[in-house]
Amino acid sequence: MADRRLQVFHTVARLLSFTKAAETLHMTQPAVTFQVRQLEEYFNTRLFDRTHNRISLTEAGSRVFEYADRIFDLYADMENSVREMTGEIRGALTIGASTTIAEYMLPALLGDFGTRYPEVTIHLRVSNSDGIVSMVENNTIDLGVVEAPVGNKNLVVEVCRLDHLVAIVPPSHDLAERESLHIDELLEYPFICREEGSGTREVINEYLSQHCKSTLNISMELGSPEAVKGAVEAGMGVSVVSRATVQKELKLDTLRAINLTPTLERPFSFVHQKQKFRLRAMEELLDFARDYCEDHAEEAL
């Protein structure tokens, strides 16, 4: 509803990047630049200083940004108030999720949410946990769901559920018949792990620092749970993954899962900005996700 030029300007000012603003708004960069120039012509002053491929707000730009923040807060408050009166839930939300969560948790959750609220459009962006937290910090997504601790104390972090991690080996492996083992025993073999920045990698590193005397012998670093599972199935090493990611392989007996002692668990958490006003659709999604996590807490995830 707000002036499109002001929406585009506000996004550029928040991200301090025309390129990132274009990605966030699903526009081309020339279109973003055009909208900002239109607003600058309207005020007859520059709103950004552009030097060496970097931009910063001018004094006038900072003033416009302050007012734009207040305007969009009022719009959100107005929309929430009217939606609450009418009971209508609609709008568009952008959710970011780390790879494991996007592949194994969110499809069912978002499918059920879409059935209940067909007028809400949800866009999903997938990255590792560090990337998702960065998107939340930059306001490029409305809600993140991550699999590692979040260090930014200015963000709201709410644990959804605990995820159980296990060692995985191929059926022909020396350890395949074990029900449990200590991490030191696993690390006698070549280890296949996720890339730096992955929530799984971060949680495993923290676990190793607390419970392991051995040195991690990394044979491969891979960018997805599917790639890690494939490498282990091929006999290229062992790994530690979420039990939720190997349900199909366990049924087909292409992998064996072994519990670690001590138990390795991590939180799956919602993370979002501390906005005073949020779209009603965002509130409904959070409430729905909380209930979903509680209802499915006993499942293998």
Image: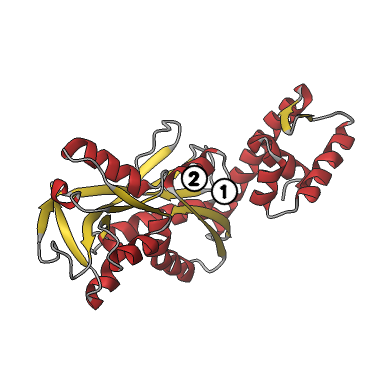
Q: Quadrant of residue 180?
A: bottom left
Q: Amino acid at mark 1?
A: Ser
Q: Residue at x 57, y 48 (%)?
A: 81
In depth, the one of 41 and 215 nearer the eye is: 215
Point out residue 212 in the picture as x, y percentages from the top left corner: 17, 40
Residue 288 appears in view: no
Q: Residue at x 57, y 42 (%)?
A: 139
Dot 1: few (<14), some (14–19), or many (≥20) neighbours within 10 Å? some
Point out residue 273 in the picture as x, y percentages from the top left corner: 49, 39
Residue 289 appears in view: yes
Q: Relative to 51, is 268 above or below? A: below
Q: Which residue has dot 2 on it?
A: 131
- Give the tally of numbered discs: 2
Which circle, 1 or 2, is nearer the viewer? 2
> For the residues marked 1 and 2, what is the alpha-carbon distance in whole angstroms?
33 Å
In depth, the one of 247 and 159 nearer the eye is: 247
Q: Amino acid at mark 2?
A: Gly
Q: Quadrant of residue 27?
A: bottom right
Point out residue 119 in the picture as x, y percentages from the top left corner: 57, 66
Dot 2: few (<14), some (14–19), or many (≥20) neighbours within 10 Å? some
Task: Determine whether, in the image, residue 37 is placed left or right of residue 163.
Answer: right
Task: Determine whether, in the image, residue 192 is placed left or right of residue 63.
Answer: left
Residue 168, numbered label: none
Q: How is the image coloured?
A: secondary structure
Q: Relative to 226, is 290 above or below? A: above
Which is more N-terminal, label 2 or label 1? Answer: 1
Callout 2: helix, strand or loop?
A: helix
Looking at the rendering, in which quadrant would you find the C terminus? bottom left
Q: Quadrant of residue 168?
A: bottom left
Point out residue 121 in the picture as x, y percentages from the top left corner: 57, 63
Q: Which residue has dot 1 on it?
A: 81
